[in-house]
Image (spheres, rainbow, N blue to C red):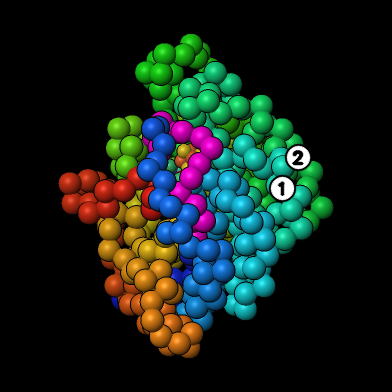
């Protein structure tokens, strides 16, 4: 379906939980005030919304959170979405801590892509940045994921928030002398996986951190690898701009929400774990679909109300974010509440 500005909306991010087994400094350093499970949509309710969304043209779904793999039944949910008429592509974004345990089930359920969030390859800094996470666990998960996905050609991506790691390490009081963001390039060199750098957005605790400038990162990359070439092949559902480096098995991508504003091609909706449908990260406006699901009416009436509410959310999708003017943002929640 097209929104009020003619953009085709075909992608929805579904958060299945607001809980997480890490405490990333820029996301939920002190944890979250967990809402009772009764307020979180059941997987069946989320799948029903997904089925309605497919009638409106949603074709691609990303499962997110919180940490989606802490939600019991997450792999079953992948299967439910894969069995939904109209849904063509189901992917997940995870911090990787539980991925070694679940990757075979995800693959079995039909997952179409796995994104692993990883901001540094330094174990001490990772631990400090994530509030106690084990880099070894993520590295083991990555090895296992590479094996599990290879024969089915399931794409794996690494997502790293663009941070000045040396500054951050100093701020967190850990000794880090590494090469900064460049250390993550070793993964794209050694494995057939894309490494993407994501500009820090001024959402929640993210406001306290300054993003690296992607223009500068790209210039540095070009100086390091003069053979660098733009890679125009389609890599996924989102707005990343990719580059190939001779001798590298994977590509390097940049998602530049602030300095390379891509709102004119934004194709997404977000469903929070409590069933609130948002059409832009920046604003709190949205539709409470849980109220419809759990309200009065026959099942047919509820489906009609869900469709109407989703249609309105799409039609009312704002033209653009206003991250460059944080004082104009109306969304005050953190990434976990919104569903990152
Ligand atoms: N727990 C999962 C994970 O870490 O991949 C899924 C949820 S997490 C909120 C999704 C992504 O959002 C992660 O890659 C995280 O680094 C990113 N993120 C969190 N806060 C952010 C912010 N303020 N700006 C940009 N990305 C952010
Ligand atoms: Fe958890 Fe992901 Fe937020 Fe880190 S970024 S605290 S892993 S939800």
Extent of the magenta region: 14-28
Q: Is mark 1 within 8 Å of ligand 1?
A: no
Q: Which residue is mark 2?
A: 144
**Which quadrant would residue 97 be assigned to in this image?**
top right
Q: Is residue 62 left or right of residue 270?
A: right
Residue drawn where x is 34% and y is 55% of the image: 281
**Which quadrant would residue 141 be assigned to in this image?**
top right
Residue drawn where x is 42% and y is 64% of the image: 275
Residue drawn where x is 56% and y is 64% of the image: 43
Say whether disc 2 or disc 1 marks the residue closer to the N-terminus. 1
339 over 146 or under it: above or below: below
Where is residue 39 shown, x and y percent of the image? 42, 59
Dominant SS of magenta comes to loop
Q: Is mark 2 within 8 Å of ligand 1?
A: no
Q: Is residue 151 left or right of residue 193?
A: right
Where is residue 131 shown, x and y percent of the image? 48, 27
Q: Residues within 10 Å of mark 1 (few under 14, many from 20)?
A: many
Residue 222 in view:
no
Residue 26 in magenta stretch: yes
> Looking at this view, is 50 or 279 the one in front?
50
* Helix, strand or loop status at disc 2: helix
Which residue is at the far left?
327
Mark 1 and mark 2 in contact (Cβ < 8 Å)? yes
Q: Is residue 156 left or right of residue 65?
A: right
Q: CA distance from mark 2 to mark 1?
A: 8 Å
Where is residue 99 shown, x and y percent of the image? 67, 42
Q: Which residue is mark 1?
A: 103
The N terminus lies in which quarter of the figure? bottom left
Which residue is at the far top?
175
83 over 198 or under it: above or below: below
């Amino acid at each position: 379906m097209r929104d009020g500005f003619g953009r085709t909306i075909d992608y929805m991010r579904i958060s299945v939980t607001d809980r997480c087994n890490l405490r990333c400094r820029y996301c939920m350093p002190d944890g979250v005030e967990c809402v009772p499970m009764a307020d979180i949509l059941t997987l069946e309710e989320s799948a029903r919304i997904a089925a309605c969304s497919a009638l409106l043209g949603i074709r691609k779904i990303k499962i997110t959170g919180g940490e989606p793999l802490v939600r019991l039944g997450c792999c079953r949910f992948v299967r439910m979405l894969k069995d939904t008429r109209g849904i063509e592509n189901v992917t997940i974004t995870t911090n990787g801590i539980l991925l070694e345990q679940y990757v075979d089930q995800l693959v079995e359920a039909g997952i179409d892509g796995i994104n692993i969030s990883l901001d540094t390859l330094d174990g001490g800094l990772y631990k400090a940045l994530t509030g106690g996470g084990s880099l070894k666990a993520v590295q083991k998960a990555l090895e296992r994921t590479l094996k599990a996905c290879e024969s089915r050609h399931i794409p794996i991506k690494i997502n790293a928030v663009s941070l000045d790691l040396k500054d951050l390490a100093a701020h967190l009081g850990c000794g880090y002398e590494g090469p900064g963001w460049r250390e993550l390039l070793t993964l794209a060199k050694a494995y057939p996986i894309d490494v993407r750098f994501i500009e820090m957005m001024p959402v929640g605790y993210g406001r306290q951190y300054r993003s690296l400038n992607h223009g500068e990162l790209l210039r540095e990359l070009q100086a390091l690898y003069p053979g660098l070439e733009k890679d125009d092949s389609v890599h996924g559902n989102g707005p990343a701009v990719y580059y190939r480096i001779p001798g590298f098995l994977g590509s390097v991508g940049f998602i530049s929400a602030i300095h390379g504003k891509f709102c004119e091609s934004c194709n997404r909706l977000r469903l929070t774990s409590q069933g609130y449908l948002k059409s832009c990260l920046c604003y709190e406006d949205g539709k409470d679909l849980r109220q419809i699901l759990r309200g009065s009416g026959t099942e047919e009436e509820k489906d009609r109300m869900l469709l109407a509410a989703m249609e309105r959310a799409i039609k009312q999708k704002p033209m653009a974010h206003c991250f460059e003017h944080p004082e104009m943002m109306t969304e005050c929640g953190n990434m976990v509440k919104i569903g990152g």
